[in-house]
Image: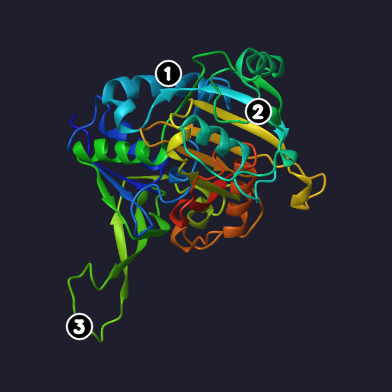
Amino acid sequence: MAQAPRSIVIIGGGIIGCTTAYYITHHPSYSTDTKVTIVETSAHGEAQGASGKAGGLVARWAYPQPLVDVSFDEHVRLAELHGGSERWGWRYVNCGSWDGRGEDISEGTSDFDRESVEADGLTGRGKSLKKTLGLEGGKSHAKKNKDKGLPHDLNWMHSDLTDSYTPMAPSGDTAQVHPYLFTQSMLALAQECGASFLPSTKATAIRISPSGHIIGIDCTVTRTRKSLGSDIQNEPETIVEQMHLEATHVIIAAGAWAPHILPALPLTGTRAHSITIHPPAHTLPIAPYVLFTEITPPSSSGRGSFHAIPEIYARPGPNGEVYACGPGDDAPLPDSVDDVDVDSSACDAIWEDVRSVSRWGKGKVPSSARRTLWREG
């Protein structure tokens, strides 16, 4: 008996929604009789929420364990099958817990920059030696690193500001992806097999028949005058239309916004902040480490006994890129992902903490690389 055609609507164009579309369209029983549609609220495309602004850590030691036992090996398989190293930055990394003290680098050039400047044969004006901790070279420096547990190839953290370093997992148990590129690739691979992607389409309700079967979703579609090909000046910039999509199955993958569609879902949103650092050329290449840090800020910071806990991820690529994120807070969830406002002060605080312990004192964090995201919990 032939199977009835199915129409599957996935609400949310983040990493869960796009990988769900990938797995449906790559399943052995998938055929063109199954229609797969991803609807995404953002006008800017896929991975505009946490999926495009997270760190991308993949670890055997993470949680929940039943999921990790499957997901790590699946990441390995996907990377081998689709060229993940080139497409989405898949690689194995080292991971550890780093404790230490931040240095005030508000005056002149930091020790980290001076070390690199001298190594490159350049010149620069540094701070007074009385204000620095000094850098030791040769065997004594290597021995000091070893005493603190600091790996010899972790070349982007200041050893004299390090109190301790502890590996968090054996080699081969931690990896990373660039989450935006991974999500983008999963969507592209699903689209190659027939999946559709509808941006600017906000699901508002799931329709259920009197007999209790799903029959579709209600949406609002926001179109711009430019997308409609109109140049009439007196028309509004955006037009909001109501739309109904028929569906036999609905999958909600909207992250922190999922309860907006199904209020019974026991999810809440936690706001977090992240930045992407473009390190100076003389600090490249960057050793592949992910660090969970606890930093005692310098006394000049005025933060007292407060400890900063940014996570720092070195990312692959010839130009070097570093991702860092800070702790979450309980700010109210905005209406949609496109309504998220970047908290510049929170992003600045992350940057100050990272540059106070690393060799990236003269790195750059463009305004486009300062992000605010919501994670479901």
**Mark 1 lies on residue:** 73
Q: Vertical placement of 191 versus 368: above or below?
A: above
Label 1 and label 2: CA atoms lie apart by 42 Å
Q: Quadrant of the C terminus?
A: top right
In the image, residue 278 lies at what x, y percent?
Answer: 45, 43
Secondary structure beneath dot 2 equals: loop
* Amino acid at the residue labelled 3: Ile
> Where is residue 198 drawn, in percent x and y?
29, 54
User: First in sequence: mark 3 or mark 2?
Assistant: 2
Distance in Å between CA atoms under marks 3 and 2: 65 Å
Quadrant of the image occupied by residue 201: bottom left
Residue at point 17%, 37% (across, down): 32
Image coords of residue 79 (percent x, y): 33, 24
Numbered mark located on residue 232 in the image: 3
Q: In the depicted view, which residue is nearer to us: 320 or 13?
A: 320
Q: Is residue 326 left or right of residue 7?
A: right
Crowdedness near tag 2: few (<14), some (14–19) or many (≥20) residues, C-alpha within 10 Å = few
Residue type, label 1: Asp
Q: Quadrant of the N terminus?
A: top left
User: At numbered mark 1, what does the secondary structure look like: helix, strand or loop?
Assistant: helix
Note whether 1 is above or below 325 in the view shown: above
Image point (47%, 45%), residue name: 53
Task: Of the two numbered discs 1 and 2 on the same chain, state the one appearing first in sequence.
Answer: 1
Q: Which label belongs to residue 135?
A: 2
